[in-house]
Structures are given as C-alpha cells and as structure tokens.
Image: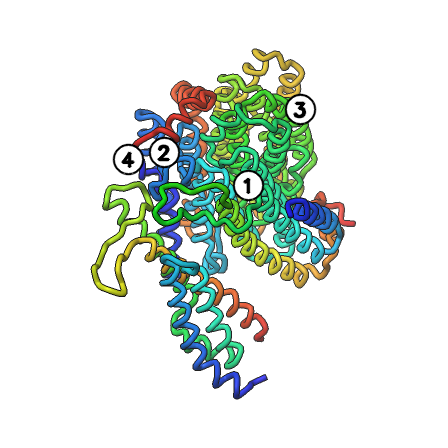
C-alpha cells in the first residue's frame, strides 16, 4: 500500500511539474492543484500507514496500545486541504479575470510587467 | 504575562472583524486602521520590554503541553520583528489615508491590511512549523488580494507570477513538513532542535533542509528564485508596494534565520550555509544590476530589495554571533529605509504624475524639503555614515572579514557602490534635472488640489521613518545591543528549548 | 430553468437540511461532525434553495448578509477564547460548565468555537456562491 501511494505521489509530482511549465494558464492551475495534492498525499504516506487502528484509548485503560494510526498527519492534511481549497479558488478566479482583462491565456504573452518601459515589442 | 503573545495576532483580527461589520463606513475603517495599528505598536513594545527583562515568553495554546500542542514563542528576534511589523503597519495605515482611493477602501482595503499584519505577526511568533505554514498562507492570501485590488491589467499580470510562484513555494513547504514529520516525529521547533542531532536518516534531513531553503528562498526572493518580485511589486498602489517591500520578503529571511540557526544546526546544515553564502553573492549582484538598468522608480526599488536580501543572507550564512546581530540590524534598518523610499516615490508620482524617471524632473526646484526626505533613506540604504545603513553594512562586512570571506566582502562593497549609483540616478533624474515637459506642468497644480489633510498623511510617515533612520545612525549602540542579545539568544538553542519545552509561565 | 417540483421541495428541504446541520454541529461534541461539516450542510441547504428559486429569493430568505455571517462567526470564535483568560488558564484552554440539565449536559468554549466555525463556513460558502451568481447579471 505504501509503495502504491509512493508511486501515485511520484506521478502527481511529475504531472504537476510538467503542467506548471506549460504556457496555458489553465494547465498551470491544474499543475498547482496536482502539486498540492501530491504534497498532501505525501504527508499521509510518510506519516506511516496503519490500517484499522484508530488512536483511541480503550475504556478502562490509561494509555493507548500499539499499533495505532497517527492522527496528526490527517489533521495536517485536513488543514492543508482547506487552505489549499481557498487559495486554489482564489487562483482560478484570478486567472479567469486575467484572461478577461488581458485577453490572452498564453503566459508568454503576459510579459508587460517584466519589460523595461520603452522597449515595447 | 504570556498571553500578551496572542495580542499582536488577535488585535488585527478583531479590528478586521469590526471593519467587516461596518463595511459601508470607510471613514470608520480609516480611523480603526490607524488606531488598531497604533495599539498593536504599543502592545508589541510592551512585549519586547517584557521579553528583554523576563526572557523568552512561550504560550501553549489550549493548555496542551509543548511538543503536542501548538506553541507561540516570543524571543528577542520575534519580538523585535513584531515591533518592526507594527511600526511599518502604522505608517502604512497613515500613508494609506492620503493615497488609497475610495473604490479600494470600499473593497476591504483596510481589513485586508489588518489581516496581512496578522499573518506576518503570526509567522514571527509561532514555534511550530506547520503553524508557520498556516500563517504564511494567511499572509499570502491577504497579499494576493491586496495585490489585485483595483484589477488593472498589469496588476493581474503581475499577480499571476506572484501567485504561481508563491503557491509552488507553499507546496514545497508542505512536502518538507511532511518528510520532516515522517523523519523526526515532531513539528515543534524547540523539540526539533533537541531531537535532530540524535536522529538517524541523515540524508533525509539534508533533503528536508534543502526543501526548506528553497521554500524560504522563494519567499525571501534570493537568487535564482526572485523572479516573482520585480514582476509584481511595482503594480499595486504604492502604499501596498511599500508594506510588501518592507515586510514580506523579510518574513522569508526571518524563517531562514530561525530555521538554520535554531533548528537545523547539525553538521549537514553546514552544507546549506555554504550554498546560502554562494547564493548571497549572486543575489546582491543580480539585484543591484537589475536596479541600475531600470527607469521606473518602483521597479528600481523592487530590484534593490533583492540586492539587500543578499546582504542579510550573507550575514546569516556566516553564522558568527556578530554576523547574526548584523543580519538582524540589517533587516530592521532595511525595513525602515526601503518602505520609506517607496513612500517617497509615491509622493513624487503624486507631484509629477509618473514613476518613469525619464519623464519627470525638477522636483528639487519646487520642493527642496522633499529632496532632504528622499536623501535620508536613499543614503541610508547605500550605507553613507552616519545613517543606519552604514552601521548595518559595517557590522556585516566586519563579520565577513573576521570569518575570512574576503571575496564576498569585496563583492558586498562593490554592490554598495552600485546601490549608491542607482540612488544618485533617482536623485539626478527626478530631483536635479529640469522637468522635460517644461515648468509648472498640470500635475503641479493637481498637487495643490489635494486636501491638506491628505498631504500631511503622505508626508508624516516619510518624516517618521526618516527620523528613525537618523536615530539608528546616531544612537546606534542601544539598538545594536538589542540585536546582539537577540543573536546570542538565537545561537544558544538550549535556552530556546528550555523556554518552550520546560517553561511554566 | 424553473422547476415547480424542485422549488416546492427546496422549501421543505431547506428546513430539514438546516435542522440536520444543527444536529451535525452539536454531534461534533463527541462524535464525527462539528462546525465545519454543519456549516457546509447549511450552506448546501441555501445553495439548493438558490438553484431552485433564484438568487433574490435566496437572499430574502437568508435575511442576513453573508459577510455579516462571516464576521459574526469570527467574533464568536474570538469570544470563545476569552473565558480561558478569565479562568487564568493558557490561551484557548477549554472551559466547561456542567449545567446539570439533562440532554444539554456540559457546555463549554469548544462548542462556542465550533459555532463560530459553523457561521464562518456558512458565510464564506454563501459569499462565494452569491458573488458567482451575481457576476452573470448585467
């Protein structure tokens, strides 16, 4: 299971990296989302997978017994997903507005902010 | 007393919430913004005082013991940075009163400023790495909105670059946090500092270190990760550019400082310090070269931010107590001078109607006092004695010579010359030469039409920040002692661990 | 796109879903649930009503501005941190009061915080939804 997740994380990273290098802003958004998911899944995987053992102290016992699943990575991922959701929603709206205002979705054409004033090409 | 750590975070949140309730009254927003930041400045000064006398403060949120819950920690470094944040926040709030238009105010300019300050303060005060990520995101999302507020095409174009690269940095941050948790089993900085020297999997730790360096490097705009900065910082209104220029990149520098002097201090980290040293030289040179080529004042100043970051990283990478103190003093001096220069450029634009140095001129002839107001931060930045920049560069270079990095010292000195050159360029073009469009152009009269209250609000922050630059220069010693104390504290991670893990306050 | 069936159903579903969302909020006490999920369900209830009856009707039945709901949520969440200071505990430590009343039982600041989250999620989701809906208007 860990191996499979590792492969998925790798594929997501590869796809995300490929996509953010594209010229189309839509693909860049997908790339960013993939990278976010890859990171989340990676936290999940490196937090060590333990199946069917929630971290509850059984009734009457003082401490939890091994093995138990570490709940912290899941809490981290939940926070990261919520934050990522908000930021990605903002990004999508921003890219849409940019497309409407600038009139292109080709990143190579969006270079006015990097040019020296005067050399309009 | 430790609950005072919460106040720099809670105050701006409360102010923002009240503003959202009364969102139709922009007059109230303005008053609340200025009052809220003034109060924050007061609180942060009290906090600095209590940290100075009583040592490191730590607050365990929810009463959970240190490595398990989230800790907020205020040591000297954090409290100094919070004071600087509150101070820049206050002056920006004043400056916004004179420059921000009603439309932006209506679209939540003031609450966003408060939330930005909350994010920055949170990032400075947290003692937990994942919490640092959360505060980074709070800071980023408010900065995203502030950047695009107004929606002009160049703003949106700049924002695309800013947002994409910063989101990339966030996802790298997240990955680094994940691997670190998998390796060390904790995310509390103090706990990490205690545990990392004992861990196995050293090679994974190096990977984590490099990932963190890239993340914070993007935020701090070091070479070769800075390209988002000159593409976006000149697009929003100048009050926003000023607070971004002053504070946002410094959060990245702070994170590098905290990380690679408190947490990652094992022998593998020496490699990262070598890399940082190498990159700092490029950062200094490339930044200043970019600045020299520019004619847009704000772009010129944006490139300067990068060059100045190089000095801070250089000092950080040396790692001697003197160098760390120098880096901290450099950060504070730079926050003040850089923000001030942006304010001045905004004022010149108001007078002459353009940021382009080729189109304007003759400012000195009509506004000689403005010339003085410009020269204080400009010469301060270039490092002319007795202004603050001289001392900042002096310490950094002294530390460089002590540690025998002669080549880097030489580069730093040359870059200093180029900095002075580009400041003189602004002076020559904007102040000294005649106005290419002839005297008494329309913009001059337009300036007379600005209500005098607004004029005061534009000039007052410049005067305040300028006098701070002078005070840093003439009464250098007490400030350096503060920085020195912070540096000693920072390098002694034992005290930090003790305060967070064992502190009962 | 007006559908009589959906419009009629949404009126009853709104009430049911809102009740369910409050149930989820209170259940989050000890079991899966809580302010976040509750807020989402409540937002879904209004979203359904908006799809069936249009944006104006949805705004009318909501009565409050979504932005005010966000601010209220934040305010409630901030207020939930204050009792810990009064009790002299670390910041945000949970303070519980045993009311002794059956069915209600212990009431504490985490519940208040959850309520804040509930309002916040409801407000934010509706703000996003409503502004997207109003963008298409001339």
Residue count near mark 3 (Cα–Cα under 10 Å), binned few <14, some 14–19, many ≥20: some
| First in residue order: circle 3 vs circle 2 | 2
Seen at 61% across and 57% down, the residue is A94
On whether disc 4 and disc 2 are found on a single subunit, the reply is yes
For this view, does C21 lie left or right of residue B220?
left
Res. B58 mark = 2
Label 2 resides on the chain identified as: B
Q: CA distance from mark 4 to mark 3?
A: 43 Å
Nearer the viewer's eye, disc 4 or disc 2?
2
Nearer the viewer's eye, disc 3 or disc 1?
3
Which quadrant of the figure has residue B82?
Answer: top left
Residue corresponding to mark 4:
B1
| First in residue order: circle 4 vs circle 3 | 4
Disc 1, SS: helix
Residue count near mark 4 (Cα–Cα under 10 Å), binned few <14, some 14–19, many ≥20: few
The percent position of residue A28, horizontal first and vertical second, equals 69, 53
Residue corresponding to mark 3:
B278
Nearer the viewer's eye, disc 4 or disc 1?
4
For this view, does B344 lie left or right of residue B416?
left
Nearer the viewer's eye, disc 4 or disc 3?
4
| First in residue order: circle 3 vs circle 1 | 3
| First in residue order: circle 4 vs circle 2 | 4
Residue count near mark 2 (Cα–Cα under 10 Å), binned few <14, some 14–19, many ≥20: many
| First in residue order: circle 2 vs circle 1 | 2
Q: CA distance from mark 3 to mark 2?
A: 35 Å
The one nearer the camera, B373 or B197, is B197
Which quadrant of the figure has residue B156?
Answer: bottom right
The percent position of residue A72, horizontal first and vertical second, equals 49, 45
Disc 3, disc 1: CB below 8 Å? Answer: no
Disc 2, disc 1: CB below 8 Å? Answer: no
């Amino acid at each position: 299971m860990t191996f499979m997740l590792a492969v998925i994380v790798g594929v997501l990273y590869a796809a995300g990296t490929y996509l953010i290098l594209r010229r189309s802003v839509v693909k860049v958004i997908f790339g960013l989302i993939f990278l976010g998911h890859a990171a989340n899944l990676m936290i999940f995987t490196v937090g060590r997978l333990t199946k069917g053992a929630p971290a509850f102290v059984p009734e009457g016992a003082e401490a939890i017994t091994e093995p138990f699943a570490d709940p912290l990575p899941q809490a981290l991922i939940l926070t990261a997903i919520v934050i990522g959701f908000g930021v990605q929603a903002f990004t999508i709206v921003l890219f849409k507005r940019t497309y409407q205002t600038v009139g292109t979705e080709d990143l190579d054409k969006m270079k006015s902010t990097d040019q020296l004033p005067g050399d309009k090409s | 007393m430790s609950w005072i750590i919460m106040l720099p975070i809670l105050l701006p949140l409360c102010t923002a919430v009240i503003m959202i309730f009364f969102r139709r009254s922009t007059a109230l927003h303005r008053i609340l913004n200025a009052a809220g930041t003034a109060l924050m400045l007061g609180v942060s000064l009290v906090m600095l005082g209590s940290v100075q006398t009583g040592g490191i403060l730590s607050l365990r949120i929810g009463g959970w013991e240190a490595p398990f819950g989230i800790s907020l920690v205020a040591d000297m470094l954090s409290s100094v940075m919070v004071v600087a944040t509150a101070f820049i926040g206050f002056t920006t709030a004043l400056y916004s009163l004179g420059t921000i238009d009603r439309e932006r105010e209506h679209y939540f300019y003031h609450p966003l400023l408060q939330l930005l300050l909350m994010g920055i303060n949170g990032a400075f005060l947290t003692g937990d790495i994942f919490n640092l990520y959360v505060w980074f995101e709070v800071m980023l999302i408010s900065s995203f909105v502030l950047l695009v507020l107004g929606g002009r095409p160049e703003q949106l174009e700049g924002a695309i670059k800013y947002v994409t690269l910063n989101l990339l940095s966030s996802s790298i941050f997240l990955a680094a946090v994940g691997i670190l948790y998998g390796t060390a089993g904790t995310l509390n900085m103090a706990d990490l500092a205690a545990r990392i020297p004992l861990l196995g999997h050293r090679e994974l730790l190096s990977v984590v270190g490099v990932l963190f360096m890239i993340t914070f490097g993007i935020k701090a705009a070091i070479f070769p990760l800075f390209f988002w900065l000159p593409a976006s910082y000149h697009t929003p209104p100048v009050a926003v550019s000023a607070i971004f220029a002053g504070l946002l990149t410094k959060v990245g520098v702070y994170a590098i400082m905290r990380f690679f002097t408190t947490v990652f201090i094992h022998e593998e980290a020496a490699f990262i310090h070598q890399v940082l040293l190498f990159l700092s030289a490029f950062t200094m040179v490339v930044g200043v070269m970019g600045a020299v080529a520019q004619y847009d004042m704000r772009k010129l100043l944006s490139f300067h931010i990068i060059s100045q970051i190089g000095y801070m990283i250089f000092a950080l990478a040396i790692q001697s107590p003197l160098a760390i103190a120098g880096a901290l003093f450099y950060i504070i001096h730079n926050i003040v001078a850089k923000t001030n220069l942006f304010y001045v450029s905004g004022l010149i634009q108001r007078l002459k109607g353009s940021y382009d140095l080729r189109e304007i001129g003759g400012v000195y002839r009509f506004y000689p006092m403005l010339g003085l107001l410009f020269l204080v931060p400009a010469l301060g930045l270039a490092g002319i004695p007795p202004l603050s920049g001289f001392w900042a560069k002096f310490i950094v270079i002294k530390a460089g010579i002590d540690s025998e990095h002669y080549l880097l010292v030489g580069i730093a000195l040359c870059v200093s010359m180029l900095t002075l050159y580009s400041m003189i360029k602004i002076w020559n073009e904007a102040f000294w030469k005649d106005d290419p469009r002839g005297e008494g152009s329309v913009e001059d009269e337009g300036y007379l039409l600005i209500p005098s209250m607004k004029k005061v609000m534009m000039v007052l922050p410049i005067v305040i920040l300028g006098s701070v630059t002078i005070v840093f220069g003439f009464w250098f010693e007490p400030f350096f002692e503060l920085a020195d104390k912070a540096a000693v504290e920072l390098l002694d991670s034992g005290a930090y661990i003790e305060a967070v893990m064992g502190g009962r306050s | 796109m007006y559908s009589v069936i959906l419009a009629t159903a949404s009126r009853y579903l709104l009430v049911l879903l809102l009740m369910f969302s409050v149930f989820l909020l209170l259940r989050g006490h000890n079991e899966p649930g809580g302010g976040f999920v509750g807020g989402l369900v409540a937002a879904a209830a209004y979203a359904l009503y908006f799809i069936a009856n249009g944006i104006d009707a949805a705004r009318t039945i909501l009565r409050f501005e979504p932005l005010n709901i966000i601010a209220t949520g934040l305010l409630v969440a901030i207020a939930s941190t204050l009792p810990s200071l009064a009790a002299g505990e670390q910041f945000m430590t949970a303070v519980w009061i045993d009311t002794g009343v059956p069915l209600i039982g212990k009431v504490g600041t985490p519940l208040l915080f959850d309520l804040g989250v509930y309002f916040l999620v409801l407000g934010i989701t509706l703000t996003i939804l409503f502004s997207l809906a109003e963008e298409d208007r001339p």
